[in-house]
Image (cartoon, rainbow, N blue to C red):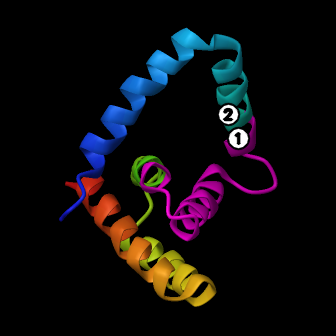
Amino acid sequence: MTKDYKALTKDISEYAGELKKAVPEAMEGFYAMSAAATADGALDKKTKEFIALAIGVTQRCDGCIGFHAKALHKLGATREEIAEIMAMCVYMGGGPALMYAADALRAFDQFSE
């Protein structure tokens, strides 16, 4: 079964909005941490998104893969860069990482369409 990362991220975003209504302080804290962690600093935003995508792959998180592939597409990442990051994920995570690395490349391709 092919995963549709555009639909997946849309669905998660809708329910994240519901969660924000239910626990606004907690969600505001999460979003503030996200903004601070991804802001340009010693590492630029694109590099940080590469790291986040790699962690999403090795942690087997479809939502993380979708959101960070989408962010990397918007930041001008290339398919070749994504593929090299995925090679590092497979190197560090073995076979299970390969399964999610393939999905991460698929997610990037879907957001590139």
Q: Residue 39: give its label.
A: 1
Quarter of the C terminus within the rendering: bottom left
Q: Nearer the viewer, mark 1 or mark 2?
A: 2
Residue 109 position, x and y percent, is: 27, 62
Secondary structure at numbered mark 2: helix
**Magenta stretch prevailing secondary structure:** helix
Residue 51 belongs to the span the image colors magenta: yes
Quarter of the N terminus within the rendering: bottom left
Residue 30 position, x and y percent, is: 68, 30
Is residue 43 rendered to the left or right of residue 62?
A: right
Quadrant in the picture for residue 25: top right
Question: What amino acid is at disc 2?
Answer: Ala
Residue toward you, 48 or 65: 65
Q: Is residue 26 above or below residue 1?
A: above
Image point 53% across, 10% down: which residue?
Answer: 21
Residue 39 position, x and y percent, is: 70, 41
Quadrant in the picture for residue 77: bottom left
Contact (Cβ within 8 Å) of mark 1 with mark 2: yes
* Number of marks present in the image shown: 2
Residue 98 belongs to the span the image colors magenta: no
Residue placed furthest toward the right:
42
Image point 39% across, 77% down: which residue?
Answer: 99
Residue 16 position, x and y percent, is: 48, 26
The magenta segment: 36-65
Image point 49% across, 57% down: which residue?
Answer: 61
Residue toward you, 77 or 58: 58
Reading the image, the residue beneath label 2 is: 35
